[in-house]
Image (spheres, rainbow, N blue to C red):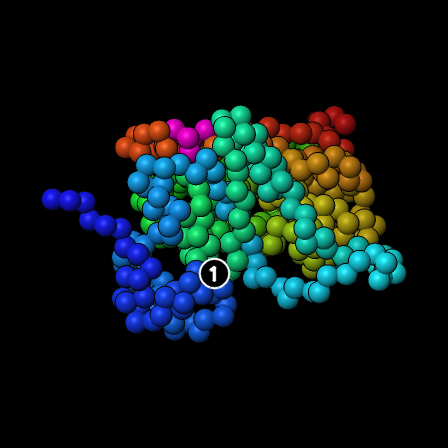
């Protein structure tokens, strides 16, 4: 019996009861299609197992020589008309309250992308980095499948069912969390690292309760780090409380100010460095000295933590190595699609700095 032909865009259009142009519009500009039509087309794509042309060619034996990395994104803002320096004066922005946020900077993903690039290029592949807008994660993932030989996805930036579906169609590796379905995964020892730094804080802190600045509820990293924190404070005899942040400097400062209205902590343990940096700002504003009155720690090991005042004690996770290992794991999966799934956990270490230094300092 001859092999069944892969579904085409014509099959999708017929199944969804729309035109080929509408299918193309859903794949390229989903925001321009009504929600009901978009859902109908996406359902047809899922039911038929349709993949864009480039991916279908890859399934027939041809390689693209490109690996994909899908990182979180947001719905695109309106695109401003282009301008030039000659047409505009240099703008002054009042940032005395440090409220300006650079939307183009994400320290965590910078290191991950760097590791993926290093590993991909050394293995003879190019790296295509794509951002998954909130509106169309399924569409972006489908489109990426059609352009690359394998995909690396940040855990929980795409729903588990979509990751499992893609893993059945192309080699796929999940980073920063356990994989869904048959995908492989690379992550770090979040719980162990947080437990270690919490033990250090409890032995080093001045008097006062412990404030834990956690992350979003849907973050696998955040969940594991909170588990490590709770493991050490439960039964320690210390008073402690937890506040949730969005893993940003602004969110850390906001939650720190809110907590200071009720308590004067002896320690702040943050689930990531940016939240800790925000906490340092709020503590300084309140006249609370670090580390004499309150010790502060973070998690990630971003470069900015070295230059804060005081320098931030943090758990360093090897994000460049995560990227390197994710690419190598993806290449192994591409070479042997039937190999057993892997879940690789990389070690972390604690960088002791002024905000919570060694014992006796």
Between 40 and 288, the one lying in front of the other is 40
The reply to whether residue 317 is visible in this rendering is no
Judged left or right of residue 296, residue 84 is right
In reply to whether residue 330 is colored magenta, the answer given is yes
Location of residue 318 in the rendering, given as x and y in whole percent from the top left corner: 58, 31
- The residue wearing badge 1 is 28
Residue at horizontal 77 percent and vertical 61 percent from the top: 83
Q: Which secondary structure dominates the residues rendered in magenta?
A: helix
* Residue 134 located within the stretch drawn in magenta: no
| Residue at image point 70% right, 58% down | 254
Quadrant in the picture for residue 116? top right
The answer, for residue 11, to whether it is visible in the render is yes
* Mark 1 Cα-neighbour bin, 10 Å: few <14, some 14–19, many ≥20: some
Residue at point 88% right, 61% down? 89
Quadrant in which residue 114 is drawn: top right
Residue 81 locus on image (x, y percent)? 71, 65
- Residue 13 percent across, percent down from the top left: 32, 66
Q: Which residues are magenta?
A: 328-332
User: Residue drawn at (45%, 71%), measured in percent from left and top?
Assistant: 33
| 190 to the left or right of 353 | left
Q: Decide: is 83 above or below 237.
A: below
Q: Position of residue 115 (x, y in %)?
A: 57, 32
Relative to the observer, which residue lies in front, 7 or 75? 7
**253 horizontally vs 52: left or right:** right
Q: Where on the picture, by quarter, is residue 117?
A: top right
């Amino acid at each position: 019996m001859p092999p069944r032909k892969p579904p085409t865009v014509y099959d999708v259009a017929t199944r969804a009861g729309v035109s080929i142009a509408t299918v193309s519009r859903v794949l390229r500009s989903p925001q321009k299609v009504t929600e009901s039509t978009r859902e109908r087309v996406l359902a047809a794509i899922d039911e038929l197992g349709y993949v864009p042309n480039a991916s279908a060619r890859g399934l027939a034996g041809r390689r693209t020589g490109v690996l994909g990395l899908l990182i979180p994104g947001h719905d695109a803002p309106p695109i401003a008309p282009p301008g030039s320096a000659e047409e505009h004066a240099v703008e002054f922005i009042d940032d005395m309250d440090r409220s300006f946020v650079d939307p183009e900077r994400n320290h965590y993903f910078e290191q991950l992308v760097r590791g993926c690039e290093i590993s991909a290029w050394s293995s003879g592949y190019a790296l295509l980095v794509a951002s998954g807008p909130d509106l169309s994660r399924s569409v972006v993932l489908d489109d990426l499948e059609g352009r690359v030989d394998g995909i690396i996805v940040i855990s929980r930036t795409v729903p588990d069912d979509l990751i499992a579906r893609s893993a059945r169609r192309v080699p796929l590796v999940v980073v920063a969390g356990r994989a869904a379905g048959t995908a492989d995964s690379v992550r770090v020892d979040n719980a162990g690292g947080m437990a270690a730094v919490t033990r250090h804080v409890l032995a080093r802190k001045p008097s006062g309760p412990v404030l834990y600045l956690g992350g979003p509820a849907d973050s696998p990293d955040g969940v594991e780090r909170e588990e490590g924190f709770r493991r050490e404070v439960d039964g320690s005899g210390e008073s402690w409380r937890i506040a949730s942040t969005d893993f940003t400097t602004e969110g850390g400062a906001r939650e720190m100010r809110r907590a200071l209205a009720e308590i004067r902590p002896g320690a702040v343990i943050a689930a990531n460095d940016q939240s800790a940096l925000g906490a340092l700002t709020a503590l300084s504003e309140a006249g609370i000295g670090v580390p004499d009155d309150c010790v502060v720690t973070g998690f990630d090991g971003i470069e900015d933590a070295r230059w804060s005042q005081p320098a931030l004690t943090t758990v360093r996770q090897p994000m460049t190595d995560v990227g390197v290992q994710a690419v190598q794991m993806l290449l192994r999966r591409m070479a042997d699609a039937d190999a057993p799934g892997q879940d690789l956990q990389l070690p972390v270490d604690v960088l002791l700095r002024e905000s919570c230094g060694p014992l006796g300092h």
